[in-house]
Image: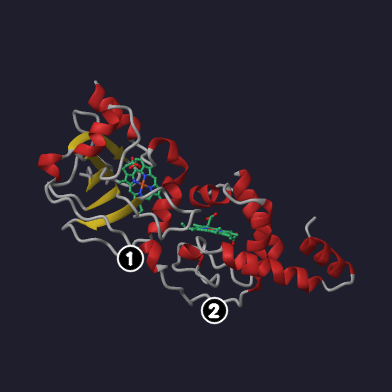
Amino acid sequence: MNQFGILMAAVSALGFVSYANAADVAMGKQKSEACAACHGANGISVSEKYPNLAGQKETYLGKQLHAFKAKTRENTLMNAIAEQLSDEDIGDLAAFFSSQPGGDGKAKSTLVAAINKSRVTFPKDYKSTYTKYTTISFAKKKQVRHYYANPIAVKAAKAGKPLPNGSKIFVEAFKVKLDENKMPIEGADGHLVAAGENPAFFTAMEIQAGWGDDIPDLLRNGDWNYAVFSGTGELKTAVNQASCLACHKPLADISYVFSLPSLTDAITK
Ligand code: HEC
Ligand code: HEC
């Protein structure tokens, strides 16, 4: 135990437990930068998708974080985040959020600008310069998606190397044709049939030097940024990039790209 620990032990032995809590709350505030992207800096969340943590019981918050860490409570985003937290982090974070005043259920925090800012631009020339490497059908979502990689990504994947700065993965997401029962129709190639020529939206991820610098470590995917574009190519600024980062985070070994094995397969065949 360091001097501070001995002091705190003495303080709580005397019954001044709140002193020990105060220290935890301050540490928790420091560690909560990544949480703020979804739960808000003060525990009032940024959208209906994310629960408020402010004013919740400290023990309950701690239990949930341990459960996410152990994956006995399953949620892709929170599992990826909690697995990076130590027991001490969990204690501090639970103390901090519990100490924040609760909201009225309608209050909403603003998105954290540094995390939410995506530098990815729409690649106008992708059809002529990128390599289309796979197609995936999503029956439940009623979508079919086409996956493209730019020349830098293709070259690295061919060489079996991690994707370097300048790599970009781009995805066309189409709505699909439905039959009279509103069920997706399968084409001769085994994929769902796209409804029309134009994608409903696009998703992208790109890596460039320094792009990850503003992103807290709990969420940072190296220097990758993520983006969603409308069917007409405009960047959707209301998308919370923290969710992209959190879900792709566990894939550090394959350059954070879920479909990297398909890319490697497609171009080395
Ligand atoms: C990318 C968005 C995102 C980030 C960043 C994030 N969370 Fe969450 N968190 C969620 C979502 C979504 C849920 C709801 C999970 C579910 O439905 O089970 C959640 C649930 C929780 C819960 C459970 C709440 C309850 O009422 O049961 C706790 C506690 C929590 N998060 C703490 C944290 C902490 C602490 C951090 C930062 C270290 C953090 N979260 C970062 C998205 C996020
Ligand atoms: C719940 C987890 C999850 C979240 C959240 C998520 N992704 Fe993904 N992402 C995946 C999975 C799984 C794939 C693999 C194929 C697929 O589902 O399209 C993928 C694939 C991708 C790809 C193709 C490259 C690759 O990794 O295979 C891009 C580009 C992409 N996602 C962008 C985004 C963006 C932008 C966001 C945030 C708006 C986001 N993702 C949020 C799970 C997620």
Q: Is residue 137 above or below residue 269?
A: below
The residue singled out by tag 2 in the image is 104
Residue 261 - label: none
Chain-order first, disc 2 or disc 1: 2
Q: Where residue 128 sits: x, y (%)?
A: 10, 41
Residue at image x 13%, y 51%?
Answer: 124
Q: Position of residue 120 (x, y in %)?
A: 26, 55
Q: Quadrant of residue 18?
A: bottom right
Count how many numbered circles sit on residues in the image.
Answer: 2
Judged from the image, the secondary structure of the residue bearing numbered disc 2 is loop
38 lies left or right of 95: left
Q: Are marks 2 and 1 in contact (CB under 8 Å)?
A: no
Q: Amino acid at mark 1?
A: Ala
* Mark 1 burial class by Cα count in 10 Å: few <14, some 14-19, many 20+: few
State the residue at coordinates (34%, 55%).
211
Q: In this orientation, does residue 72 appear?
A: no
Q: State the quadrant of the N terminus.
A: bottom right
* Residue denoted by label 1: 238
Left or right relative to 45: residue 115 = left
Between 234 and 194, the one lying in front of the other is 234
- 184, 238: nearer the viewer: 238
Front in this rendered view, residue 203 or 136: 203
Amino acid on which disc 2 is placed: Asp
